Structure formats: C-alpha cells, structure tokens
Amino acid sequence: QLVESGGGLVQAGGSLRLSCAASGTIFSMSIFYWYRQSPEKMREMVGAITASGETDYEDSVKGRFSISRDNAKNTVYLQMNNLKPEDTAVYYCATPWHLNLNSWGQGTQVTVTS
C-alpha cells in the first residue's frame, strides 16, 4: 500500500515536499515512480528513483523537482521547487507492481496559483 501526502495550495515560485509512505512491499529493493494527473492531461510520469538512488525526471520538471528516499522510514519524497501553475495536478507514487495492476492510491492534490 502506498499513501501520498504533502500536497496543498501554493503560489507560483513556491515549494512543496510530497511524501509516499509504503507498506507491504520490499521497500529498499523497489524502484518508485511519481506520476501526476490533471483534468486536462493523461497521467504522466514525473520521475523515478531506483533502489540504488539513481533518479530520472520528465523534461518539464528537470532542475525543479527532486526525488529522494529514506529506506529506514519506507518513504519516498518528491521535492518540488519553483512550482508553476502547469504543475497543478494530483500526484501519485507507484512501484512496478502497482503499474502492472493499474493500482493507484488516493494521491495528493497540488494546486499552484499564478
């Protein structure tokens, strides 16, 4: 089970840190993804972090977003800086298992005002 939190309302240029708490999975061995979905777009991948801590990001968030993980806390983070209105979306985390089953948590809403 994955539980996302940390979303909120922020002005453009602001920052938020999202958390994804995992249970029932071999956390330290799993790759984790962050996705987002807005009413105007299909769900898109924002970035990913491997078990070894390597990260990759979608082009529009490179240099602004950063993914990290704390294996001791079974938690993955998405640090979002210099937020833009187009970042407004519901953000989800997922593992390959969740993707294969198309199983998503409740997500956390991020709203960026101009």
Image: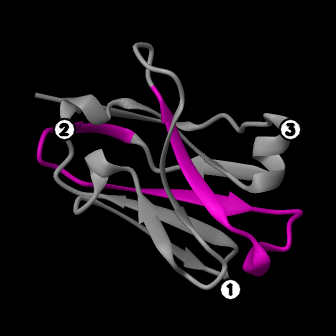
Q: Residue at x 21, y 30 (%)?
A: 85
Three-letter amino acid code of the residue under disc 1? Ala
Where on the picture, by quarter, is residue 99? top right
Which percent across, then down, holds residue 59? 31, 50
Q: Residue at x 64, y 62 (%)?
A: 32
Q: Confirm or deny contact between disc 3 and disc 1 (CB under 8 A).
A: no
Front-lying residue, 42 or 108 = 42
Which percent across, then down, holds residue 77? 50, 65
Where on the picture, by quarter, is residue 73? bottom right
Q: Quadrant of the C terminus?
A: top left
User: Mark number for residue 84?
Assistant: 2
Residue stretch in magenta: 8-37
Which percent across, then down, holds residue 10? 23, 39
Under tag 1, what secondary structure? loop
| Residue linked to disc 3 | 101
Three-letter amino acid code of the residue under disc 2? Lys
Q: Earlier in the sequence, mark 2 or mark 3?
A: 2
* As drawn, 56 above or below 34: below
| Residue linked to disc 1 | 72
Under tag 3, what secondary structure? helix
What is the CA distance from the residue labelled 3 to the residue labelled 1? Answer: 26 Å
